[in-house]
Amino acid sequence: MKNIIAISGSLRKDSYNTKVLEEIKKMIDKEVSFEILDISKVPLFNQDIENNENKDIINIKNKIKKADLVVISTPEYNYSFSGVLKNTLDWLSRGEDLVFLDKKVALISASASRFGGVRAQNHLRDVLLCMGANTLYKPEVYIAFAHDVFVDNTINDPRVKKQIINFKDNLLKEIN
């Protein structure tokens, strides 16, 4: 079975980005394995401890290595992606295991702003380029005014729902 690993760049309990990933998981889970990783326990990056074997980082690296594709959903904070996501990517870029080298990565963003995270995705693409990732450019999904999109943890906006279905269909094409 094909394997997709997903990362939400938000730790917030009611994160729109986590909700988006959970919605994709509901749509796709019977066709492929779709796992949303927990990055809440990743320590702050520090070169003094980077050679210590941190089990959370090793676990995330191993899952990404085995994945056919990685999905990253990011919020937008101050015109960029979240610090917790940057911290995780810093850890994943270190050592001999270049887990993102040539790895297919699809991006999505949900934000309370009217731009839907477009600036966050642009910055994230730059970081992933440095890491050697094969970042997919289509379809672009930027969910604006995310606080209005969800009702009872489900996407209630038909336009956004259609975008997510298109995104999901593209993920399946990329790994088959």
Image (cartoon, grey):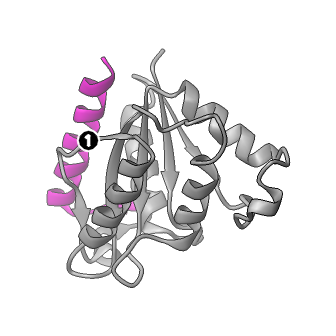
Instruction: Looking at the picture, tell me which residue is in the foreground, 66 or 150.
Output: 66
State the image coordinates of residue 100 (x, y, percent, origin top left).
Answer: 48, 38
On whether residue 165 falls in the magenta region, the answer is yes
| Image x and y of residue 16, in percent | 42, 67
For disc 1, the neighbor class at 10 Å (few under 14, some 14 to 19, many from 20) is: some
Secondary element at image label 1: loop
For residue 81, which quarter of the picture? bottom left
What residue is shown at x 34% (from left), y 66% (from top)?
123
| 105 to the left or right of 8 | left
What residue type is disc 1 on? Leu
Residue 170 lies within the magenta run:
yes
Residue at (44, 25) in percent of width and height: 68
Left or right, 153 with reference to 54: left
**Quarter-wise, where is residue 127 in the image?**
bottom left
Boundaries of the magenta span? 154-176
What secondary structure do most residues of the magenta stretch adopt?
Answer: helix
| Residue sitting at x 50%, y 62% | 9
The residue positioned farthest toward the right in the image shown? 52
